[in-house]
Image: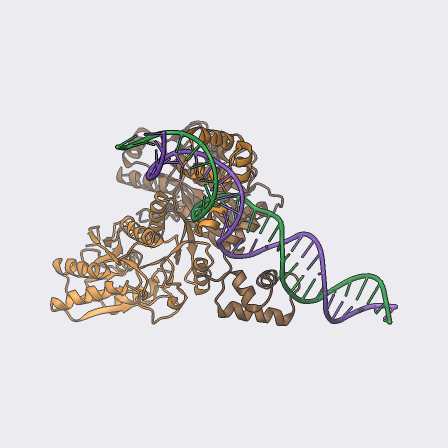
Chain colours: A orange, B brown, C purple, D green
Amino acid sequence: MPNIKDVAKKAGVGIATVSRVINDSGYVKKETREKVEKVIMEIEYVPNEIARSMTLQKNKIVAFILPNSTHLFFGELSYFVEQELFEHGYKLMICNSSEQIAKEIIYLEMLKNNRVDAVILLTNNDVESLIDKNRPVVSFDRRFEGVPYVASDNYKGGVMAAEKLLELGCKKFMFIGDDAQGDASSVITEVTNRRVGFNDCLNEHGVSDIVNIEYPLGDYIVSADYVRELMSEYKDVDGIFAISDAAAAAVIEEIELSGKRVPEDVKVIGFDGGRSFLNLGKKISSIGQSPELIAKAICSTILNLCNNKPVYDQIIPVYFFGGDTT
Amino acid sequence: MPNIKDVAKKAGVGIATVSRVINDSGYVKKETREKVEKVIMEIEYVPNEIARSMTLQKNKIVAFILPNSTHLFFGELSYFVEQELFEHGYKLMICNSSEQIAKEIIYLEMLKNNRVDAVILLTNNDVESLIDKNRPVVSFDRRFEGVPYVASDNYKGGVMAAEKLLELGCKKFMFIGDDAQGDASSVITEVTNRRVGFNDCLNEHGVSDIVNIEYPLGDYIVSADYVRELMSEYKDVDGIFAISDAAAAAVIEEIELSGKRVPEDVKVIGFDGGRSFLNLGKKISSIGQSPELIAKAICSTILNLCNNKPVYDQIIPVYFFGGDTT
DNA sequence: GCAAAACATGGAAACTGTTCCATGTTTTGC
DNA sequence: GCAAAACATGGAACAGTTTCCATGTTTTGC
């Protein structure tokens, strides 16, 4: 592979001049530039990005650490993050942790050893002490002291779900979802605010008897047996807010198998935006979060961090998506 | 950030010795090793991967260029690729081309400028001339001269679909799908073999009047209007093989809206494995391809290429997945 | 016409590792 | 006891860029 020295020698100029041509920086006489460009074409010279990274001490790669990119919402989020970063010349490294803290540690280490310039962190594990807070890190749906974060307005989402169900005349409410995922059950993510907002709003409207089911979703899937049990235990529930569309879909399926109808007998609202991939003959009503807006917010934060500009926490609005289940 | 020189100085040894300790290579006396390790801990030294890449001329990053990682099958494939690469110390850069050749070019360029060690290429565009065939590239579902490739046994899949529909007593067959995607309609990917296998098998069984619909799927979605039109044009079709589950789902939805029943009146087989995310009350019968097996095959090829070992094209078996539509 | 500003260029240092090679010390084997 | 093998260590070259700085030339303005 030819290097910058080969170009310089062949063009009869200094390497600094070649560098200036490549980067279009500093002063270069028109004829000199053309001469250098001609040589570059001839010997098919391509600047070595590793060497460039070496001197610049940055390599324009961002790591996205997340549990599992095959989950619909995460997949969409990573897609838009990649699009957005690409616009700014950054590349995306995808790091599926599969919720394993050991893998998260290895990926977080890439910040310290200069493998990546920045990290987008989406985790349910207790990794606070492992984060290098002197480097660019942005956290999604989770607060870490001293780490800028982006999240959907989960609280508002909970409120909106409650308001909608109240408006539709529901009397007995249930929240189903998982507040404490990950390796440390004590870890509280921002997702909890979906439940909090839901309960707060209902309380404000004088409803206090709310069934809060904190079922550990594990791989984001609710077991059918468990839901069936729940439904038979709380027969009078007629308004359900599920922490995700996946959870909502499982709930809906079981309700219908039990003979009740959705939305006639029980109304169900999920969370994510109703793009759920589960097999239902209907679309799930849902509190939608926009992967595109979130990606933009995350990337603007990342880019600001990389350029030593000030950053702010960002809360992204959610919207009610009316489907067939309310 | 401390560097290897700082460690050497503080430990009172040469940098070569520190390097040997870090890499556990060559001879180092036990006491020296311990002394160095102690200093490394104390000053929290982490070797700079960029510098390491510089001397080694490789950085253990693989790029996966694909149209869109949010599509279910591609998403799963990339997930397993990441898992597999991670096991071998490689990281995955995800490169959504959105079918744009301009973006593919930029990403392919990363091979030449040493940004990545290898590329996994999944494209429908005419990029043959842009591939640096002297470097590690593996192609999925597409043949390029001189580039090792991995593909599902698409031909066999087509045959299996035909056999299944014949076995179930279907008389009039239709294939629906898109042979020529991408920017150059002349590009033929291996996916074409699904149609070819389907037709060949039917021909062998004496069926020659086959409706082959080559509808440009674009973003892998079939328009409802178009399907409706088709269904009214070919009323007597009772056995359909769709190029993907997404296409199958669209077809099924329209058939049912038109008053016919699936599978009673029309039987439908898709392709991918029936994990489709579309809203149907039933599971799609499908020719399944295993993202996990494919990922393993791709990665073994990549790793062999990176280590100058011989590689072979690999055809991965498919299997019939019986759902509710046959 | 001349000083100042702008333009043009190249050498060398810096970035941070790995590894070859030279040198020196121990251990081994008989 | 001595040669050979194994162990141990450090200096320096090298990987391929960018950029500072020094030097020199041309243009500008009055």
Q: Where residue B104 sits in the image (x, y, percent)?
A: 43, 38
Q: Name the spot of residue A280 as percent of width and height, x first.
A: 29, 51
Q: Is residue B150 visible?
A: no
Vertical side of A131 occupied by B200: above or below: above
Camera-side residue: B69 or B25? B25
Q: Nearer the viewer, residue A120 or A264?
A: A120
Q: Nearer the viewer, residue C8 or B236?
A: C8
Q: Give the residue at x 31% y 62%.
A: A142
Left or right, residue A302 beside residue A102: left
Answer yes or no: is residue A315 visible.
yes
Quadrant in which the N terminus of chain A appears: top right
Instruction: Using the image as rendered, state which of residue B71 and residue A307 is in the foreground.
Output: A307
Residue visible at 61% across and 60% down? B16
Residue B277: horizontal and vertical position, in percent?
34, 48
Q: Is residue B317 left or right of residue A28?
A: right
Q: Quadrant of residue B314?
A: top right
Q: Quadrant of the C terminus of chain A?
A: bottom left
Q: Residue at x 20, y 51 (%)?
A: A322
Choose top left, top right, bottom left or bottom right for residue B236. top left
Residue A257 in the image, given as x and y percentages of width and height = 28, 58
Callout count: 0
Q: Quadrant of residue A162?
A: bottom left
In the image, residue A231 above or below residue B93: below
